[in-house]
Structures are given as structure tokens and as C-alpha cells.
Amino acid sequence: MRIVTLTPGATDIVIALGLESALVGVAEQCLLPARLSGLTRVGGLSSILPNSEQRLATEIRTLQPDVIVSDDQGFGERVALTLPNVRHIHLVTVTLDDLFENVSRVGQALGATNAAELALRGLRYRRNRIAEKTAAIRDEQKPRVLFLEQLEPPLSASRWTPQLISLAGGRSLIGVERGSPGGADWDRISVLDPDVIFVASDPLASSTPAEQLDALASRTEWRKMRAVEHHRVYLTDGKLLFNAAGPALIDALEVLAHTLHPSLHEPPLMQDVVYQPALQTRDYHAGDA
């Protein structure tokens, strides 16, 4: 079996099912373990050049896949239809339940049902452990959380991120579950006055989030916000944790839960992924709001 994955989340699911040896190509933006660094990447600059669809299709045909896994139904399906005997598995993820369903579907389609059941058992256990502890938190103890995918201009996270914040014991501001990332402005954000602000790193930004936060320090409305005054502004790795619809979303949930309520939730499996610029240290022990 030869598998090509066209999104990072699809790649992560295939790896989680123990099928990494069947991978022959992955999306350019995937984060891969060192042992898989030699895999062919598809996309990259060709995706923004003229005739990008044809270019990408040529790259994929060269790999001669049996299966294409993607969450881009239009392009993935079109490529699959041009290749004989190629299946296309289309994934849609806007909630954690969608993620669990995708793991099950990919496992069934690729003959890895047992591996999928084992992976799901672990993912659900970790999700439920967080949710059970969060259920004991009173509403007034849940901090109001603003999660930004970028700072300038502000872009609030949506899709699965509001659900992650809720499960972690926070109240999401601006972001809409199942929706697309939405624009905001600093006047509105200052009126909302969040208790906690997360900023996900943007790999396409010309400056780092830390540099952008330094620039924001000149704004009066920024300096007066509760989250800034109480040093509860956190930088985190969007590409590693929040951007891909794969098993890493459970890591993201654990990171959020411990950062929001460190006395309630144990440190996450994934360490060193939250940076608290006001303290100039990577820190999980900010204290409950």
C-alpha cells in the first residue's frame, strides 16, 4: 500500500495508526519526526504558482499512490479520479468528535481497525480525564479566554479551538465553534478585557509573535487589559498543536487545561510549548484566574 497525505492532520492520523511505512508522500507543511524526514513532500511553492493544481497532480502521480488522504475534497478527489485504482479518503474536522470519527474511518479504510480502536481509546481517555476535572469548576472560576491565530491584524481562532478552551475550563471570547477564524480589532478586544490571552505562532508572519507583542506594548488599550496586567499572555505553537486536525489536538487540550488551571491538571505530555513573555520564561505555573 502506498499512501499520500495532503494535510498535516491526515499525516498524523496515518502515523498514529502505525502505517508510516506505507507513506510515500506528505503535505509540504507537515511536521515530521526525524525518522521520516526523507519522505517526499508535495505542494510547497508549486501550490502558489500558475497551474498549481496541475503541478500538484503531477507530483502526486509520480508517487503512484494507492490511497490519498485529505480534507480538501475538491482537489484530492480530482487527483484521485485521474489515477487508476486510487481511493480518496476525505476528512472533515470541526470538533474533537469529528477527529475521533476520522481516526476510525481511516483505520477501517486502511485495514488498521485494531490500531484505530487502540488509538481512540487513548485519545478519548485523555479527553475525558480533562473534561471530568473541568466539570467540577464553577462558571465564575473559568477565565475568559481570547485565542488569536495572529496579532496584526487580530484574528481569532475558531473551528475546534473554542471547544478545546471550553473543555479545558475556560470561556472562549470571539471565536465561534465550527466557524472560520474571524477578524477582530483592538478596541473590541479591550472592551472584552480577557482574563487570558493565547497567541498561536504564525509561520507565515514576517515577525515573531514575541516581536509583535513588543510592538503592542505601546498601545494604551493593550497595557490596560487584565490579561496583560496579570501576566497571563501566552505564546504557543500553532503549527505543532492547534492548526492540524490530528491527534495533536489532544495535546493542545492538555496544554490549555494545565495553563488555565495548573493546580487542577497535571503537566501535559508535551512540554516546553507555552511561552510567557512577561516572565521571560517557559512556564506552566501561572496560577488560576
Image (cartoon, rainbow, N blue to C red):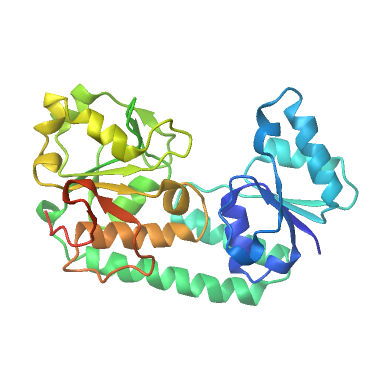
Q: Is residue 72 above or below residue 18?
A: above
* Quarter assignment of residue 19: bottom right
- Of the 4 image quadrants, the one containing the N terminus is bottom right
Above or below residue 152? Residue 159 is below
Percent position of residue 93, x then y? 52, 48
106 relative position to 101: left or right: right
For residue 210, above or below residue 10: above
Q: Can residue 151 be seen at all in this image of the molecule?
A: yes
Q: Residue furthest right?
A: 84
- Residue at point 69% right, 39% down? 43
Q: Depth check: 149 or 114 in front?
A: 149
Q: Residue at x 19, y 65 (%)?
A: 262
Q: How many marks?
A: 0
User: Residue 15's x, y, as percent?
Assistant: 62, 65
Q: Quadrant of residue 74?
A: top right
Residue depicted at 27% across the width and 60% down the height? 257
Q: Which residue is found at the position 49% from the left and 74% from the top? A: 121
Residue 194: x, y in percent?
A: 17, 39
* 96 or 50: nearer the viewer: 50
Name the residue nearer the viewer: 5 or 240.
240
Q: Is residue 248 left or right of residue 83?
A: left
Residue 104 makes an appearance in the image:
no
Could you say which is closer to the camera, residue 147 or residue 219? 219
